[in-house]
Image (spheres, rainbow, N blue to C red):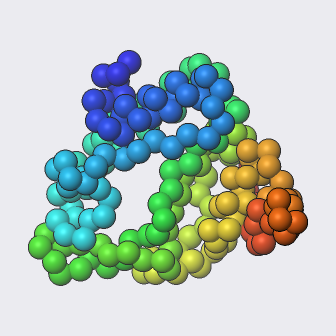
Amino acid sequence: IRDRYGLTLFGQSALAARRLVEAGVRVVTAIWDDYKVGNNAWDTHSNHFPRIKDGLCPIFDQVLPTFLDDMESRGLLEDTLVMVISEHGRTPKITETTGGGREHWSGAYWGMFFGAGIKTGQVIGATDAHGEVPADTPVRPEDVAHSMLKLLGVDPHKEYIAPSGRPLKILDKGKMIPGLV
């Protein structure tokens, strides 16, 4: 099973994540491979195409389906929310650096969601023709947080009281991503 996941940090992190979920852990993060080893982080500011083709996608394409299949075969996926997200998107235009690159871009980005009642096989939202800004069904970071909390069984708008007596809201804003479940 270790070989199926792949002997990479991401592969073994995903396997450890499955084992932790199986043991009852509620929230787990699988770590992507360290950028120092072959510079295979998703920060493709240079040499974008070879890094995607030869390093990043082969690892990702091995690990994610293996993880999802393993979770489903063990009956864990139905009750587990799996999110593949990043903190920002990438420029829609390739920069003129060595081998081409993509910079940080907060105008539009993507995410993939599986399990926990998610309707699979659909695309929610779209960007404009240039991939620069949302054009259809924009989803904001607070909507992702709201949806995640809701699917984890946490009321996203609940207010807690700190020991000092100060009220603390989990989220001030956000709504369920339309069509997600």
Q: Is residue 129 visible?
A: no
Q: Quadrant of residue 42?
A: bottom left
| 90 sits left or right of 49 in the view | right
State the image coordinates of residue 68 (x, y, percent, origin top left): 51, 33
Q: In the rendered image of this protein, does residue 18 appear above or below residue 53?
A: above
* Residue beneath the point at 76% across and 62% down: 170
Q: Is residue 118 visible?
A: yes
Q: In the rendered image of this protein, does residue 137 appear above or below residue 159?
A: below
Decide which of 137, 143 is in the foreground and name it: 143
| 19 sits left or right of 173 in the view | left
Q: Quadrant of residue 167?
A: bottom right
State the image coordinates of residue 168 (x, y, percent, origin top left): 80, 66
Q: In the rendered image of this protein, does residue 155 appear above or below residue 30?
A: below
* Residue beneath the point at 59% across and 19% down: 74
State the image coordinates of residue 133 (x, y, percent, origin top left): 52, 81
* Residue beneath the point at 28% across and 42% down: 58
* Residue beneath the point at 56% across and 48% down: 83
